[in-house]
Image (cartoon, rainbow, N blue to C red):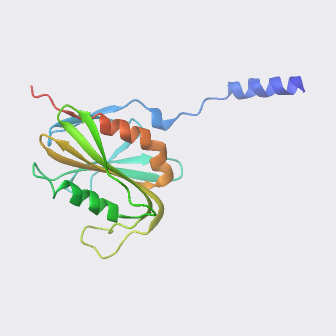
């Protein structure tokens, strides 16, 4: 029996370690407008943005599902007030409990207001469309990042399991935003 246990330990120890794709080295990223920089998790894959409103789009890939991270900027004055945007995001999810916004101090001159909603994703398929998504077991992490150059709107939406795997990376990304130093 001892021999079998020792053989099992040696065999498992000799297997290649599984790479934790959520732990890859962060990549620097800058947004000229609104004038901020950040560190994007290395596991996120930059995708082609499908709209002029989107500054950047990343996917959070996993073997079985994915989630998207999107950054929007609508100019120095933004797109409505803070609470209107948080309320709009809340309405994109059918939830058991209404998510409560949380204020996060990020860096000098940068703060964020975050919501974390879990349930069925019911946002319109396209802005202004009457057709809606109907994706149960979803999660939305969304924040309005207040910067001197205007508000930046970011959200991660997709499978609750995928967002859960990447939650620490999303929060680290959110907390990495800094005002760009002009040279």
Q: Is residue 159 above or below residue 150?
A: below
Residue 26 position within the rendered picture, expressed as x and y whole percent measured from the top left: 36, 31
* Residue pictured at 23% horizontal, 40% vertical: 111
Q: Quadrant of residue 13?
A: top right
Residue 93 position within the rendered picture, expressed as x and y whole percent measured from the top left: 38, 63
Residue 79 position within the rendered picture, expressed as x and y whole percent measured from the top left: 16, 57
Q: Is residue 180 above or below residue 10?
A: below
Left/right placement of residue 26 relative to residue 10 reads left
**Residue furthest bottom in the image:** 130
Q: Which quadrant is home to the N terminus?
A: top right
Q: Quadrant of residue 126?
A: bottom left
Front-most of residues 106 and 102 = 102
Residue 18 position within the rendered picture, expressed as x and y whole percent measured from the top left: 58, 34
* Residue pictured at 17% horizontal, 35% vertical: 109
Left/right placement of residue 146 relative to residue 176 reads left
Front-most of residues 90 and 1 = 90
* Residue pictured at 40% horizontal, 29% vertical: 25
């Amino acid at each position: 029996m001892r021999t079998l246990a020792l053989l099992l330990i040696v065999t498992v120890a000799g297997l290649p370690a599984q790479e934790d794709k959520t732990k890859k080295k962060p990549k620097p990223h800058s947004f000229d407008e609104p004038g901020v920089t950040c560190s994007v998790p290395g596991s996120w894959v930059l995708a082609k943005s499908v709209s002029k409103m989107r500054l950047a789009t990343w996917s959070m890939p996993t073997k079985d599902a994915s989630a998207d991270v999107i950054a929007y900027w609508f100019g120095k004055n933004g797109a409505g007030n803070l609470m209107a945007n948080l309320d709009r995001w809340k309405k994109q999810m059918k939830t058991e409990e209404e998510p409560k916004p949380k204020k996060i101090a990020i860096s000098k001159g940068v703060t964020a207001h975050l919501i974390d909603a879990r349930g069925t994703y019911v946002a319109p398929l396209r802005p202004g469309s009457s057709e809606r998504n109907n994706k149960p077991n979803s999660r939305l992490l969304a924040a309005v990042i207040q910067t001197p150059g205007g508000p930046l709107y970011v959200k991660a939406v997709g499978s609750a399991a995928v967002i859960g795997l990447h939650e620490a990376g999303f929060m680290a990304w959110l907390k990495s935003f800094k005002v760009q130093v002009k040279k």
